[in-house]
Image: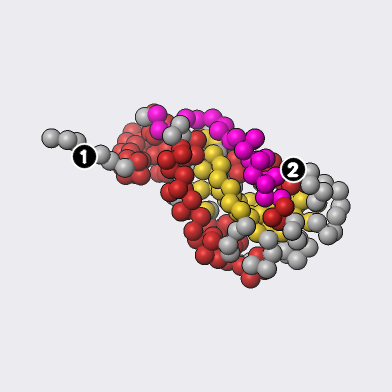
Amino acid sequence: MQAKSISRRDFIKAAGIVLGGTALVGSGLTVLDAPQPVVTYPEYTFGEENMSKRILVTYASQAGSTAGVAEAIGKSLAEGGAQVDVLPMKNVNDLAPYQAVVAGSAIHGQQWLPEAMQFMRDHQSELSRKPFASFMVCITLSMANAGQYLEGVKGWMSPVRELVHPVSEGYFAGALDFSRLPFSFNVLAMRIAVLFGVWKEGDHRNWKAIRAWAESTRPLLLK
């Protein structure tokens, strides 16, 4: 009899439960007392002061990988003669100074981070009146056969599209560094996925692809 195949999602879910239970019982819950990593969320300004061509690149990051992607996007956009501010979403209060906005988030549980979706809801009206582009960073796209998952990953952008339709969407692999991730059952599931070869630790960001997307998006933002 042919064995029933298991989806990657179900495998990761089941693996997380097994590993999580084993780790918690075996450690006597001491893992919960482990110090949580401190992640910084930097701000940058690129390009010369240009009030007529000013772009905001804003991001929500869990472990710093998405912050690095936002920085690279900002640098590339500024090469077109614009002034680009790169800010974490929690530090953005006013979109009025910007001609265009690029917003991106890390993926957690196949979704943008909660603060990223809250940013979209809070600024939906103004974002709808400006050229707007979006991007996401997820470890799924680091897999050797990531191409077969791309269409599914694009579906994770649907809640963003329902609020504001982007002129361009970027999809990038992230970095996996467990020392920068807080304890959670999801992280435990990711650890066992690494053991089974589903993912690999390390920095999988493709800087050439990130810059290329920014360069192709620039004219759509500055039209």
Specify which label sits upstream in the sequence, 2 or 1: 1
Q: Is residue 155 left or right of residue 21?
A: right
Q: Is residue 133 above or below residue 41?
A: below
> How many dots with numbers?
2
The disc placed on residue 4 is 1
Residue drawn 64% across and 67% down? 128
**Which region shows up in magenta?**
197-218
Q: Is residue 44 magenta?
A: no
Q: Is residue 199 magenta?
A: yes
Q: Is residue 92 visible?
A: no
Residue 94 on image: x %, y %: 73, 64
Q: Amino acid at mark 2?
A: Lys
Q: Is residue 110 above or below residue 34?
A: below
Residues 116 and 173: in front is 173
Residue drawn 68% across and 61% down? 131
The disc placed on residue 75 is 2
Residue 52 on image: x %, y %: 83, 60
Q: Dot 2: within a 10 Å radius of its alpha carbon, few (fewer than 14), some, or many (20 or more) residues?
A: many
